[in-house]
Amino acid sequence: MQFSSEVENMFTQDEIEEILKDEQQFYIEYGERKWLDRYFKIKAVANETQVPSIVSSISDMPYGSSDFKKSKTEMYALKTIQASEWLEILYSAIQALSPIEQELIELKYMRRRNDGSLYSDEVIYPQLYIGKTRYYEIKKEALEILGRNLYGVFAERGFS
């Protein structure tokens, strides 16, 4: 406990609040930029079907050689598997949110309008039957929790 009081004496309350605010902003941006903004692209890769090449290659290099080129079919399969794992991690992190936070994230970041653009906040909060101020509070909290959870997975598994 002594360490805690020493830290409190090192920083003013305003400085502590600023540090926490910066940390919160980091997780919000991490969740949005590294995960949600990439959602449609990764989902497309996970659902992509590649026709294998019928052109074979012959090499005098042993199979285990570091210079050995993997087949295109194998590369596409690996990308598809990695994208599917990425999506599973994202979906799992979203499931850890409260029901209203889940719905907000899905409506805002995981659905598109007919023209391909994302829905605006002004369209979403009436669908959730909440006011504008409460919507932004929930959105901020949901993005922070999501970013923290996903960052934890990143540290464990090495996903970005």
Image (tube, rainbow, N blue to C red):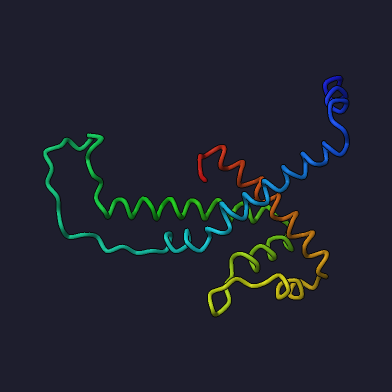
Q: What number of labels is visible?
A: 0
> Could you say which is closer to the camera, residue 81 or residue 145?
145
As displayed, is residue 112 above or below residue 109?
below
User: Which quadrant, please, contains the N terminus?
Assistant: top right
Note whether 146 is above or below 47 in the view shown: above
At a point 61% along the width and 47% down the height, the residue shown is 150
Q: Nearer the viewer, residue 16 or 86?
A: 16
Note whether 48 is above or below 5 in the view shown: below
What is the x, y in percent for residue 130? 81, 70
Which image quadrant for residue 119?
Answer: bottom right
Residue furthest to the top in view is 2
Q: Write the residue at 74% across / 63% down.
A: 100
Q: Position of residue 83 (x, y in %)?
A: 45, 54
Q: Decide if residue 136 is on the left or right side of residue 143.
A: right
Q: Is residue 65 left or right of residue 148?
A: left
Residue at the location (73% across, 74% down)?
122
Taking the spot 26% from the left edge, 53% from the top edge, the residue there is 72
Horizontal side, residue 27 vs residue 156: left or right: right
Horizontal and vertical percent for residue 12?
Answer: 87, 33
* Image spot of residue 46 (x, y percent): 43, 59
Query: In the picture, residue 152 is in which quadrant?
Result: top right
